[in-house]
Amino acid sequence: MSAEAGVPGAPRLGALETRVMDVLWDHGPATVREVITQLPTTPAYTTIATVLQNLGRKGMVRPDRQGRSTRYVPCLSRQEHTVSQIDRLLDTSQDRAASILHFVDSMPESDLALLRDYLAARGPGQER
C-alpha cells in the first residue's frame, strides 16, 4: 500500500473516493458503471474511472479483468482502513500514549464494556 505523509498503509481519501469505497465495501467488487448506479448522484463515467485508478495507486483497490470488463476489488476491509486511519492519526500525535488514553476516557460505557470483554477473552500476554 502507498505511504502518505510518511505513514505506510494510511492513504487519505477524498469525499468521492470515500463514497466509491463505501459502494465497494457494501456491495463487493464492481465495474465503473455498477459503482455509478450505487452513488446518490450520477457522476460522469470518466470521473469514476479516474477515482478508481487513483484508489488503485493508493493501494485501496485492484482491478480484476474479466474479458472486456473490469471489476474493482477492495484490497482491505472498511475496518482495516479505519484502523490504518486511527494509527496514522496516533503517529502524528506528540504523545501517542496520552492520545490513546484520552480516546479511551472519551468512550461510551458500551464501547468500554466491549473493549474489556475483548481483552479478557484475549488473555494476558496474547498478541494479535
Image (cartoon, grey):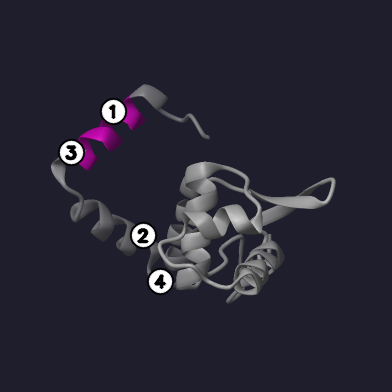
- Circle 3: element type: helix
- Residue 106, disc: none
Q: Say which of marks 3 and 4 sits in front.
A: 3
Local crowd size for mark 1, using a 10 Å CA cut-off: few (<14), some (14–19), many (≥20): few
Earlier sequence position, callout 3 versus callout 2: 2
The spot of residue 29 in percent (x, y) is 62, 45
Q: 12 or 49: nearer the eye?
A: 49
To which residue does mark 4 refer? 93
Which mark is on residue 110?
3
Q: Cα distance, mark 3 to mark 4? A: 26 Å
Looking at the rendered image, the disc whose residue lies closer to the viewer, 3 or 2, is 3
User: What residue would you read off at disc 2?
Assistant: 97
Task: Report, in whole angstroms, how far the alpha carbon at label 2 lies from the one at label 4.
Answer: 9 Å
As helix, strand or loop, the secondary structure at mark 2 comes to: helix
Is residue 71 in the magenta section? no
Helix, strand or loop for disc 1: helix
Q: What stretch is highlighted in magenta?
A: 111-120
Tell me the residue at 49%/67% (across/down). 42
Judge left or right: residue 87 versus residue 9. Answer: left
Amino acid found under the numbered disc labelled 2 = Ala
The N terminus appears in which quarter of the rendering?
bottom right
Q: Main secondary structure of the magenta part?
A: helix
Is residue 112 on the magenta stretch? yes
Q: In this view, does 126 lie above or below 71?
A: above
Residue type indicated by callout 3: Ser
Of marks 4 and 1, which one's residue comes earlier in the chain? 4
Disc 3, disc 2: CB below 8 Å? no
